Amino acid sequence: MKLNMDLQTALIIAGLVFLALLFGYNQWQIRKARRPRELSPEDDLPPMREPVVGQTTAPETATRLHEAGAESVQRREPTLAPGTPAAPSQPNHVAAAAAAAASTADADEAVAEEVAVAAGVVQAESSAQDGDAEAVSAAATGPAVAAAPAPAPAPAPAPVSVPAPVAAVPDGQPAPAMIDPLIDCIVPLHLERKASGDRILPLTGRLRRAGTKQVHIEGLRAEANAWEPVTAGHQYEDLQVGVQLANRSGPLNALEFSEFITAVESLAEALDASADLPDMSETVANARELDGFAAGSDVQLGVNVISDGAPWSAAYVQNVATQDGLVLSRDGTRFIRYQANAEGVQRPLFTLQFGDTNFLRDDLTVKSGRKITLLLDVPLADQGAKPFKTVCEYGNTLAQRMGAQLVDDNMRPLTEASFIAIFSQLETLYQKLEARGMPAGSPVALRLFSV
């Protein structure tokens, strides 16, 4: 009898260990598949037009869009298109490419303007180095993103940021808050009678996360005809609970769905409410489809500033980044350039990294290197702020001030031909995100492309 008990216990333990290993392997595969990829000018894409924010979006129909299949994702640094000649001197090539782009019939006027601005920055700084010491000083001490003024026949009008489209709320329907059917599995809770936020909040301790997915609970205020996060002192006629279907950790899986449903059922029982529970298989399938779309749109775009001479010390790079207004991240691994959005909220625009340097832990006088990387997380940066243009302008000014050049990961100079190819790819990605109802930099995109 004792032998049978020992054998049974050993089999149970072995089964539990196997399940744990299987779950861990699945999570590793999910994280591996969701790594952001990087744009490359070699990608086969339609003819280039300047990325534009459209005026109309229909989220109610966009939720029914389905991709033919998840794209094969592979991270690659921006490189020169095949057959593009290497430039012996970047400023000369920049000017030549800008003129060619402006005169090409296929080039969009907006992109030609972008190219001309970038070319003007480089030409002005190059001529300043040859004979105008005052202009060099102004470029070195001015704001990080501001470009040196280039001589032009007439000043170009300042670009106007186009606000992201706002979905119209049907008459009589409550205004939405954070929960969004585009990326959330929503469970309505029908209350028998009104409930106060003071009663609801103590019962929501388990409704914070389901595995790696965020959970939100909102209440309907009749006087405002709007959903809002449950707040103490307010009365609510109905509740809704939403769990995010996907993020950069992967899609909502069966275990996370079960954890979420269990917590919702407990809340409904405590509030004497009825819950409209969704089907697990359908929800998990929707989560996988959304994750496939997100994986194909999760792009990071980087350019590198390479020293033409001796390596830089980490202390010098820190000093330059700080003077340019970049803010060190909490973990100390990168500097962040912030920019205010249309609502005045400061959002990350791009990051500056110096190899594997940790500016909080490493000895900055000893740590050194020859490469600075400027990285743009495309889905998270507001398209209206023209983030790639800002990255290029800052990279050019940084290269001029530090005695360096702008290159890809293969150490080939990034000319205007390369930038135009990347603009083309950005337009395709922006259109793809907007067609889905989640433009780059929008609240729903910030949630989907988060961890």
Image (spheres, rainbow, N blue to C red):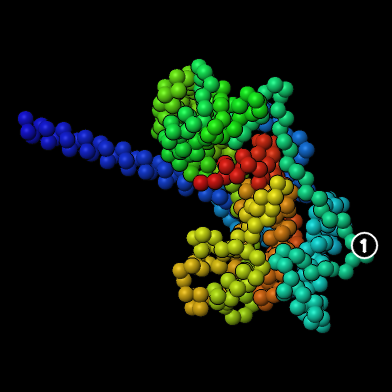
Q: Residues within 10 Å of mark 1 (few under 14, many from 20)?
A: few
> Position of 354 compared to 57: left or right?
left
> Position of 90 compared to 179: left or right?
right
Question: x%, y% of residue 223?
Answer: 65, 25
Q: Residue furthest front?
A: 233
Name the residue rendered at 89%, 61% in the picture: 155
- In this rendering, does residue 429 appear at all? no
Q: Residue furthest right?
A: 153
Look at the picture and state if 345 lies above or below 129.
above
Look at the picture and state if 344 lies above or below 134.
above
- In this rendering, does residue 202 appear at all? yes
Which quadrant holds the N terminus? top left
In depth, the one of 437 and 119 nearer the eye is: 437
Question: x%, y% of residue 219?
Answer: 56, 28
For disc 1, the marked residue is 154
How many tags in the picture?
Answer: 1
For mark 1, give the secondary structure.
Answer: loop
> Position of 291 compared to 150: left or right?
left
Look at the picture and state if 320 lies above or below 344.
below
In depth, the one of 6 and 29 nearer the eye is: 6
Q: Residue furthest left?
A: 1
Name the residue rendered at 72%, 36% in the picture: 166
Look at the picture and state if 310 lies above or below 199.
below
Inspect the image, locate mark 1, and give the three-letter code of the amino acid beneath it. Ala
Name the residue rendered at 17%, 38% in the picture: 10
Name the residue rendered at 29%, 39% in the picture: 18
In depth, the one of 331 and 34 nearer the eye is: 331
Question: x%, y% of residue 362?
Answer: 46, 71
Question: x%, y% of residue 100?
Answer: 84, 61
